[in-house]
Amino acid sequence: MPTLIDKIWDEHVVTELGGGYQLLRVDRHLLHDLGGPMSLRRLQRSGHAVRNPELTFATADHCVATDPGRDESTTEISARLVPVLRERAAIEGITYFDIESAQQGIVHVIAPELGITLPGATLVCGDSHTCTNGALGALSFGIGTSESVHVLAAQCLIEQKPKQLRVTFHGRMGTGVTAKDLALHLIATEGADYGVGHAVEYTGETISRLPMPGRMTLCNLSIELGCKIGIIAPDEQTYAFLKDTAFAPKNAAWDAALAHWRGLFTDEDAVFDREVSIDVTQIEPQVSWGTSPEETIPVSGFVPDPLDAPDDLAAASWRESIDYMGLSAGQSLQGLEIDRVFIGSCTNSRLPDLIEAAAIAEMGHVADGVVAWVVPGSGQVKRDAEALGLHERFRNSGFEWREPGCSQCVATNGEYVDPGERCVSTSNRNFVGRQGPGARTHLASPAMAAYAAIKGEIADVREVM
C-alpha cells in the first residue's frame, strides 16, 4: 500500500530515465537573493527563458540587513545581488517580493503563509531548509544551483526516489516543551546522519495536535536528521491555515483542490524502510552543547564525556566540540553565561514563536552585557506581532525589534556573532562559524532563548512557567 510520499511522488513522475532515476515535475520553485541571481544569470547565458514563470517565486531574505530603516544598500552583498534578482525576475515575469514589499520575508516563512506551498505539490528551492514546507503536505526539498537552472528552463528535475522513514510521536508535551525540542531530541537520539537517503513522515497524536507553525519547525529540522524531505499529512488544520491565502486556489478551484488533498495520507498497511517511535512525555526543553544539532542535551543534562563515546570517531568529535565551545566534560549548561540571544530564522520566527518568547521576555529585562535580537520571519509576521503589541513588550524588556530576514541564522548579511561570543539561538544550525567566525551557538526554543536573555545565562524556562 502506498505512503503519502509515494502518492505525491508517483503523481509527478514525467518519465522513467533508467538506473533508478526519474524526471519529476516541479509545481513550485522558490528563489532567494543569495542563490537566485546566480541561477537566473546562468539561465540567461544558456540562452533559455524561464519555462513557467507563474510557478516561480522570489524574495530577498538571506543577504538583506534587518536593521530598522534598512535598504538594499545597507550591506555590500545585498547591494550587489538584490538588483540582479529584481531585474531578472522582472524580465522573466517571476513574482518577486522586494525588500520593501509587504510580502517580503524569509522564503520558507512566506511560501506557506501566502499559500504558495500547497498539499500534494512538489516544491524546490536552493536552500536545504526547503523541507519546512512539508508541514503542509508538500513534497519539498533543497536543490543546488545547476538543478535550479534546470527547473527554471524545464520545470522538471532528475531525481531518485528516496527510502522512507516514519517517526511517530505520541503523548502530550510537558511544560516548556515545544516542536523545537521534539526535533532536537530526535536528532540527538538518532544522530544527524540517521535519515541520509530517506524522506521522513511525521505522524502520531502529538503531531495531530501540533499547530501549523510547530509542524513547520519540526519539518524544518528534517535536514538536520539527514533527510532532505520532511512531511506531515494535511488535515483540517492545514486547510484552515491555507484558506483565503493570496496564492491558494479560490472558489470552485478550492473545492476541487480540497477533494484531492483529502486523499493525501499514508495507507494503513504501508511499509516504511525505517520506523521510530517517541514518547514525548519523556522530553524536556533541549539545548545544544556542541557544533552539530545532534550534540544536544536536555536542559537538566550534562555535557558528555568523550570517554563514554560509542567509538573513537565520536570521541574525537566530542573533544573537538567541547574545546571549540569552551566547555568541560560533565558540565551543566545551566548557569553558563551568554553574550547574545537571537530569536528568528526559518525555524522559529513565526507569530506563535514570538508570542511564546514575549511572554517570557516581559518577566524581566535583558541582562547587562547581553545583546538580544528579535527578527520576525516576514512582513506579515511583523505586522501581526505589532498589532498585538509584541514589539513594545520586547523593547520594554531590552530586546531589539528588527526587520524581516534570515539575519544571524546564516550571517551572510554582516549580522554576525563576534568571535568567542556565546549565543543562544532559535535557528537550526550550530556549525562552526555558522553565526560568524569563532561564534559559539546554543540551539534552543524561543522561550528558552528569551529566558536566557533576561537571566544572562542558560537556564531552565520551566522555572517560570
Image (tube, rainbow, N blue to C red):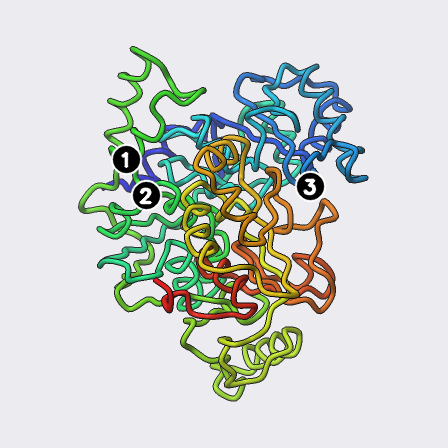
The residue carrying pointer 3 sits among few (fewer than 14), some (14 to 19) or many (20 or more) residues within 10 Å by Cα, namely some
Image point (78%, 24%), residue name: 45
Q: Secondary structure at mark 1?
A: helix
Q: Is residue 27 above or below residue 298?
A: above
**Residue type highlighted by circle 1:** Gln
Q: Amino acid at mark 3?
A: Asp
Residue 97's disc is: none
Q: Nearer the viewer, mark 2 or mark 3?
A: 3
Q: Which residue shows up at 36% across the image and 33% down it?
A: 8
If the image is split into quadrants, where does the C terminus sit?
A: bottom left
Does residue 309 appear left or right of residue 369 in this picture? left
The earlier-in-sequence mark between 1 and 3 is 3
Please tell me how crowded label 2 is: few (under 14), some (14-19), or many (20+) other residues with Cα within 10 Å.
some
Most foreground residue, 55 or 326 = 326
Looking at the picture, how far across and down is residue 186, in whole percent?
A: 39, 62
From the image, tell me which residue sits under label 3.
67
Kindly tell me whether residue 19 is visible in this rendering.
no
Image coordinates for residue 294, horizontal then vertical, percent: 49, 66
Q: Which of pointers 2 and 1 lies earlier in the amino acid sequence?
A: 2
Write down the residue under mark 1.
237
Discs 2, 1 touching: Cβ within 8 Å:
yes
Judge by depth and name the residue closer to the eye, 81 or 36: 81
Q: What residue is at 28 percent from the left and 42 percent from the top?
A: 3
Please report the residue visible at 66 percent of the width from the left and 16 percent of the height from the top. 92
In the picture, the disc for residue 211 is: 2
- Whole-percent x, y for residue 221 in the image: 47, 52
- The answer to whether mark 1 and mark 3 are in CB contact below 8 A is no
Q: Is residue 329 above or below residue 205?
A: below
From mark 2 to mark 3, how far is it between C-alphas? 30 Å
Which three-letter amino acid code belongs to the residue tagged 2? Pro
Q: Nearer the viewer, mark 1 or mark 3?
A: 3
